[in-house]
Every structure is written in structure tokens, then in C-alpha cells.
Amino acid sequence: MTQLNRTINRRNFLQSGIAAGLYVAGASGKTFAANANEEINLGFIGCGGRGGDLIRYFKKIDGVNIAGMYDPDPGRAQGTKNSSKTAAEVYPDIRKLLEDDGIDAVVIAACNHWHCLAAIWAMEAGKDVYVEKPLSHSQWEGQQTVAAARKYNRICQVGTQQRSDPMQAEIQKFLHEDKALGNILSARVNRYGRRGPIGKRKTPLVIDSKIDYDMWLGPAQREPLYRNSLHYDWHWDWNTGSGEMGNWGVHVLDDVRNNVFQDKVALPKRIMGGGGRVAWNDAGESPNVHFVYFDTGSIPVVIGLSNLQERGSAKHPGPGSGYIAYCEGGRLEGQRGRAVAFDKDGKQIKSFKGRGGNGLHQQNFIDAVRSRDASSLNTDVQVGHLSTGWCNLANIAFRAGSTFSHAAAKEVTGDRGVWGSLLGETERHLGTHNIKIESTQIKLSPMLTVDVENELFIGDHAKTANAFLKRQYRKGYEVPEIVLGKALLDERGAPTTRHTENL
């Protein structure tokens, strides 16, 4: 039996034998709830830019020790250790970090394709988890991560940090309790942030021999890379990333789920989306222009996304990275750290100021680790899974699409206002780059119907779309299917796994 399995078995035994709420099933046997001042040792998985940011936030929290780091690029791990001025041990393998009984919780800031597997391995090892957004690389593995948190009774926070900004509660009160702008009619989400091409090589990228590339790939397939850089630009490769929709779209869509719907809408009932990777001729696969309609059964939502330069009059309404709640009595424009409300005449009537959530979100996680109260998390894994789900579905709509046509886009009927405006703005935006929206460069999906309870597509075109709900995993890095007993499903609201045989 491996050391990791021995640790898991011992922890599961301890969890089953000690009263709920008193014991944290950490390898060191620390009773955090009984002694809230006990030090918590954190291990960091992924030591790039965001990993370094998170180390700085967690370092400021009393009683937290940065104890370990792992990155398949050992130079990045050592560099982050040096720059953060910590005494953390740099581990040669992620499994060595997880085996260490001295690590109480892990912070995962690796590539998107590693988020769920690393989180599940950590929870199986009895550790609590802070995992960066987007939670999942595919919808099925997100379900397994939620199930793992429930099965192993772990605290699992997803890194949509704006959820911890007190401003969000003020906005919800303004919109829903005070109804200061009347009923919400529709919502528009924006992510307009300029980026550049990632290059297109004639020969595959040569990976630095110091990097453990097998571990870097993990669950992803081994494929030649024709971009110029291994790090960061994995975002735009479907094998490892989720495009701009998963990178930034998850933040602003999560704001809408939180502030417009107050989390009462889990996933959209129908979705139509399209876009293209245009103008750059690079090695990226995900769209740099993306537009999606979400039918929620109540308030219609659209998202517009572009990484191209905005030119001339082809400019979007509202904040570049944020959302607009269109209401009977005006509109509210929200973004990270601030929001502004306008009446029907466009006069500003109220403003909101926030802190963005960093620092507070990490403190919220540590507080929950100490209290053992997952309900106190501002982005519990289930919340993060569903917000990520909107992005996963949006990406599937793009990938399942065919050539755009205005005739097909008119399948959105009752909500043509917000959808029609987005399409018109996108057409003008593309036109400034000499691209016609009705061309082979731009795709559009059919209208796709979602079985919200089981988180899969049904009806026409379901077979094509469902093929993207679960990826193929490399041997040795498979995300396991987590099966829960009925008691846990009822008590903790974990997702059903009934649909897995259909994938």
C-alpha cells in the first residue's frame, strides 16, 4: 500500500469516528474548530503569476504558513519561493506534496486542465482546497469535484474572489430588496480586453528539458504545440485551456449569477452561441470574438467577448469587463470593485465602491477551514461549478457550431432586443477588421437545449454537444467518477452522476 493510500485510509477512519464539527481530518490531527488559533500549513500547486499573487494574499492572514510549493517547471517554483520570501519546501512531485502529513490545505493555481484532478487528489488525501477559476475544464469533471468535496467532507473554495466583496450584497439589496430600478428585464455581460496573437510556428515547440512535461500535461493529450510559449498561452488551446470565456468570462458571468439571479438559476435552459478566431492567423483554437445567448427561463442573458482592438464607432455598451442589468426604471452597470446605477434618462442615481475581493476571499477560505462550515464559503465548490458551467456550455456552443447566418440567429425570438443589439455591435466590430459576420470565419451553433438537473444536452443536436461534456484523459491522470450515497446527495446537494453512461 502506498503512503498516500495509507494516509487516505487513516483519515477516512478518523473522519468516521469523531463527532462532526469538532475534528478536521488533516494528517496532523489538528483540531482547527476546537482551537481556532492553530497554524494552518498551505501547499501551493502552480507557481506562476496567479500562484504568486495568492501566496501574497495568504501570507497576510494570521495563523497561515506557506509550507510547500509544487510546479512542473521547477524554476518557477524556486523563483516564486525566493520572491515570496517564504521557507516553503519545494516538492519534486505533486504527489509528494499531497502525501505530506504536514500540509493541511492546498491552493491550486495550475493550468485549467489540472484544476479538477488536483483538487480531487487533494481531497482524497484529506486536505481542504482553494482552487482557481474556472473550476473545471469540462462539465463532467466539475461534477466529480463537487462530489469529492461532499464525499470526503472537505472545504473547497473556488477563486471567483469578487464573491467576497461586500459591495455585492449592497448591489443585491439595491436590485432585489429595495427594487430601486424595478424588475430586471435582461442582462448583458462584457469581456472586451485586447490581447495579441500567440504565434504560429512551422515546427513544434521544443519543451525545456528541466520541465516535467509529462506532469505538466497531466490529464491533457500529448500533442505538438505550434505556439511560441508553453506558459500562459495554454489558455487558448482546447487541450489545456478554456479560452477567454473560461479565463475572464467566468468572473463576469458569476457576477450575473450572484447579483442578477441570486444563484436561483443554476444553468441556462437553452443556449445559442458563436464566434471565431480571426485576424491573427496564430496557433490558438479558442475564439477571440465570442457571443452567446442564454435562455434562463426568466431573465435573458447575453455575453459579448472580444480580444481584438475596438475601432471607430464599433464600441460595446457598459464596462469592458462587467455586466449591465437592464431594468424597468433604468440600468445598473457593474464591474470588479465598482458599480453605477442610472435612471431611465441616463442620470446617475447611485454608485457602489468595492475592494475586488482579493484578501477577503482567501480569509473566507481560512475561516471555513477552521470552523469546518462549508456553508460559510462565499464560493463553495458547487457555486463555482455552476458558474463555470455557463462558460463550459458557451464554449461547447462555439465548438458545435457551423457557419454563421442571420437567418439561423433569428431562432432567438422573444429576446431579440438584447441579442439583436449584441449581434449588431459584433458585426460592426468585425467589420472594422474587414471580417464579415456571415462568412466561413464565424460560427454559430443551433439552439441547444439543456437538461439542467442532469447537466447535459437533450433534443436536437444533443449528440454533437454532449461529446464535449467529458474529455478523454491520459492514462494515469484520469479524473475518477465519484459515487455518493443517497444520504450525502440529499443532505449536501451534490450533483447527480446518473448521466455518465450517456457520455
Image (tube, rainbow, N blue to C red):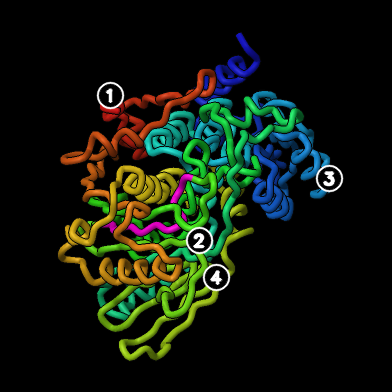
N-terminal of the pair, mark 2 or mark 1, is 2
Is 424 in front, or is 85?
A: 424
Mark seen at residue 307: 2
* 134 up-or-down from 321: above or below: above
Residue 121 lies in quadrant: top right
Q: Which residue sits at x=72%, y=35%?
A: 73
Residue 344 lies in quadrant: bottom left
Please tell me whether mark 1 or mark 4 is closer to you in this view: 1
Badge 1 is on which residue?
Answer: 501
Find residue 342 and report its horizontal and vertical position in percent. Answer: 38, 84
Q: Mark 2 packing: few (<14 Cα in 10 Å), some, or many (20+)?
A: some
Give me the C-alpha separation between circle 1 and circle 4.
Answer: 43 Å
Q: Which element is circle 3 on?
A: helix
Badge 3 is on which residue?
Answer: 82
Find residue 318 and report its horizontal and vertical position in percent. Answer: 43, 75
Badge 4 is on which residue?
Answer: 337
N-terminal of the pair, mark 2 or mark 4, is 2
Give me the C-alpha separation between circle 3 and circle 4.
Answer: 31 Å
Specify the farthest residue to the top.
Answer: 1
* Residue 335 drawn in magenta: no
Is 93 in front, or is 214?
A: 214
Tell me the magenta residue range: 285-294
Q: Give the residue type at disc 2.
A: Asn
Give me the C-alpha separation between circle 3 and circle 1.
Answer: 48 Å
Q: Mark 3 packing: few (<14 Cα in 10 Å), some, or many (20+)?
A: few
Give me the C-alpha separation between circle 2 and circle 1.
Answer: 38 Å
Is 373 in front, or is 399?
A: 399
Mark seen at residue 199: none
